[in-house]
Image (cartoon, grey):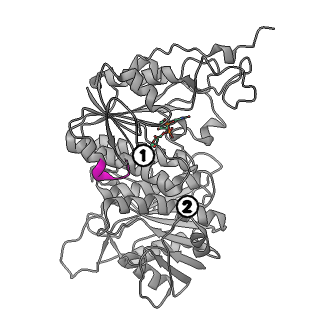
Amino acid sequence: MNVLILGANGELGPHVVRALEGRHRLRLSDINELETRHEYLKVDASDIDQVIAAADGMDVIINLSVLRKDRRLAFDVNARGCYNMMVAAVEHGIDRVINTGPFYVVAGPTYERFDHMIGPDVPHQPGTYLYALTKSLGQEICRVFTDSHDIHVLDLLFYMFLDAETHTVESGSPIANIGHDLVPYTVSWGDAADAFGCALDVELDSLPSRSEVFFVFPDLPHQKFSNEKTRRILGWEPKDKLDQFWKKAKS
Amino acid sequence: MKVLTTQASSHLSLELARSLSSSHAIRLTDRIEVSTDLEFVRSDLDHGASTNELVRGMDAIVHSGDVDPAASVSDQLDYQMRCTYNLLWAAAEEGVQRFVYLSSLRLMEGYDPALAVTERWRPLPTPDVPVLCYHLGEMVCREFARERKINVLILRLGEITAESAAGSPVSPSALYMDDAVDAVEKALDAEHSGWLDIYHIQSAVPNGRYLTGQPWWSADDVSPPLSLGYEPRARN
Ligand SMILES: NC(=O)c1ccc[n+]([C@@H]2O[C@H](COP(=O)([O-])OP(=O)(O)OC[C@H]3O[C@@H](n4cnc5c(N)ncnc54)[C@H](O)[C@@H]3O)[C@@H](O)[C@H]2O)c1
């Protein structure tokens, strides 16, 4: 498939490129310059004309663009960027969009503080945190478009990433410490990237609706969040169990 | 009561402000200069001290979800999401007690007119930009209410309609200005749940499409029955 990636030059981008290259023709884009052997376009996701032009000839758009802190840019990129992407999809007859964001697009503090077995299909409660709310608005814009256009949006949500090999003894890490637990929604970079392959492979007809949200993390024993849907529908099989973190170290 | 009203350049806001000014101290604002006899403060509703200054000392804010149809799509979306967010943050920080968001019954147009659609029904937004903007504006308001940063009332207004010559057809969701003013007056005074209160507002017209005046009722004992007390004026 011909795949446009927006925001390809961030932390996650190179992992996704590695997982997809060879199987798909990639057109990478970012607001920054990017050294790559793939086709590259400089695209500002908040500029509707640039996004429409970049999507020409593509079968799929993957959106990895994000801006977290600045109020104006967060709305521009995280929310309006999704509007631009969906208009581009309509314009070019693209029927598969893979959007991304943090878990609190769905499950902000009003869930995370209180609940367990939080799944991706609960009503969204992002709260007022800028990053969460702007990404949630973006996801909602995507959903609204899927109500009136034949476009499928798969929203892959993440919380913490780590490299299972190298994330070792950093005691005091807020993410994960060997034998001392981890954020109960953590995934290795490689496994996260593999989920994009699954989202490209899955038959659109097999999806329950045209807008589906997935929580991407391996089986963890905490039962804080649920990854069941991701495994069932996308057939995603994570390799890194991360049990060195959630099992006590042997003394 | 000191009330800030946004979108001063819109017909609705200006009419509302004029009527409310007989019983409230009104401050109008807009991103462009507007000439008016009422107090006017131009503001970009940006993230910064000037937005805090704009809302400081206000008891309530009436924020319109109408977008300027002449503005670009990007500007319309930006106004309804970012500027609403900035305004709510500033209002919460400055201790403004009440935020009235003027949304639209167009969010419910997807339902068959034969259905008894009330505030409990799920909005059905479309990618049509003005409709999408109301929905996204409501979503921003909803999260502030959820965190109880400020009391939010959402009024979903019918189609603002001038008093027409007798006999000419009116929209089944028509809302005449006197009823709109009455609803906003009531929203400024009404008892508030402390959560998020949503009300559908239209005038009494032949084949009126939306039910109004339905009190909120829940079987729990922490959110008592609540009503805006709005009743459209009877018309012949
Ligand atoms: N890294 C994490 O810990 C984490 C956690 C949860 C979710 N996510 C999600 O994963 C996705 C990828 O995140 P990441 O970690 O790679 O983020 P990142 O900040 O490392 O990269 C984001 C990329 O977006 C680009 N970008 C910014 N503004 C842009 C614009 N106007 N137009 C085009 N591109 C623009 C940046 O240049 C950057 O290359 C995002 O949706 C993010 O919300 C990341």
Q: Residue at x 46, y 56 (%)?
A: B138
State left or right for residue A174 relative to residue B234: right
Residue farthest to the right? A251
Label 2 element class: strand
Q: Is residue A153 magenta?
A: no
Q: Compared to A86, does A234 lie above or below?
A: above
Q: Nearer the viewer, residue A31 or A215?
A: A31
- Name the amino acid, label 2: Val
Q: Nearer the viewer, residue B23 or B217?
A: B23
Q: Is residue A46 magenta?
A: yes
User: Circle 1: is it few (<14), some (14-19), or many (20+) Cα within 10 Å?
Assistant: many
Q: Nearer the viewer, residue A208 or A57?
A: A57
Q: Could you tell me which chain the residue with mark 2 belongs to? A: B
- Name the amino acid, label 1: Gly
Which percent across, then down, holds residue A90? Answer: 24, 43
Label 2 CB less than 8 angstroms from ligand 1 = no
**CA–CA distance in space, label 2 to label 1:** 22 Å
Q: How many marks?
A: 2
Residue farthest to the top? A250
Give the quarter of the figure containing the N terminus of chain B. bottom right
Which percent across, then down, holds residue A109? Answer: 62, 41
Tell me the number on the disc at residue A138.
Answer: 1
Magenta residues (range) = A45-50
According to the picture, the residue beneath numbered tag 2 turns out to be B152
Please tell me if label 2 and label 1 are on a single chain. Answer: no
User: Circle 2: is it few (<14), some (14-19), or many (20+) Cα within 10 Å?
Assistant: many
